[in-house]
Image (spheres, rainbow, N blue to C red):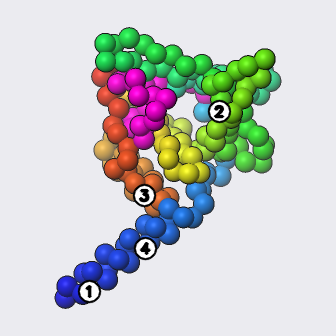
Amino acid sequence: MQTGVVLMMLGCLGLCAAAADAPLQVVDAVDAVQYMGLWYAVASIPTSFGKQCIQGTTAEYTLLENGTIQVVNTCYDAAGNPDVARGHAWIPDPTESAKLKVSFVRFLGLWWFGAPYWVIDLADDYSYAVVGHPSRKYGWILSRTPSLPDDVFAGIVQRLEAQGYRFEDFRIIDQSINQ
């Protein structure tokens, strides 16, 4: 009996490792117009560039006339002071609209060091989106509202893990400042 349990656990670990090694899958398409607007970060993998962000993280996207996207990320530090980062996003290959690049480094009128911003899960009505990175070192669960229903959140977590992410790497973001 114990051998069976051990073999089953090893099999599950093998499946998780295989999912983590498989290329990250994106959604079929993203309608840029529908994607624009304000998103609340419900959970994310903590990053060194967001360590000051204690609560209230949001991202606001605005489609520009040239087809690129203005990005304004806002969060609040421990004292409740806002921290705003302005960036720029674009779709390098129009046939893969779910694979964007985003940069927060502008120099000599150009945006440098574009990082992958891949939409890997998206509600049909654009009420939530999940953004990933091919390395799986970064990830964000975004919502049009400061929180998501438990069943919707659980489904997102399940799909994240099926893509090779470990949900225990994510932290829930306090959105009480935005309610």
**Crowd band around label 3 with a 10 angstrom C-alpha radius: few (<14), some (14–19), many (20+):** some
Looking at the image, is mark 1 or mark 3 earlier in the sequence?
1
- Report the front residue among 134 and 127: 134
**Residue on which disc 1 sits:** 4
The answer to whether residue 175 is above or below residue 123 is above
Amino acid type at image mark 4: Gly
Q: Secondary structure at mark 1?
A: helix
Q: CA distance from mark 3 to mark 2?
A: 24 Å
Looking at the image, is mark 2 or mark 1 earlier in the sequence?
1
Q: Quadrant of residue 105?
A: top right
Q: Quadrant of residue 9?
A: bottom left
Q: Secondary structure at mark 3?
A: helix
- Check the picture and name the quadrant holding the N terminus: bottom left
Give the tally of numbered discs: 4
> Which span is picked out in magenta?
36-58
**Crowd band around label 4 with a 10 angstrom C-alpha radius: few (<14), some (14–19), many (20+):** few
Q: Which mark is residue 14?
A: 4
* Tag 1–tag 3 contact (CB < 8 Å): no
Looking at the image, is mark 3 or mark 4 earlier in the sequence?
4
Q: Residue at x 55, y 19 (%)?
A: 85
**Residue on which disc 3 sits:** 161
Looking at the image, is mark 2 or mark 4 earlier in the sequence?
4
Q: Which mark is residue 102?
A: 2
User: Percent from the top left, x then y, of residue 81?
Assistant: 38, 11
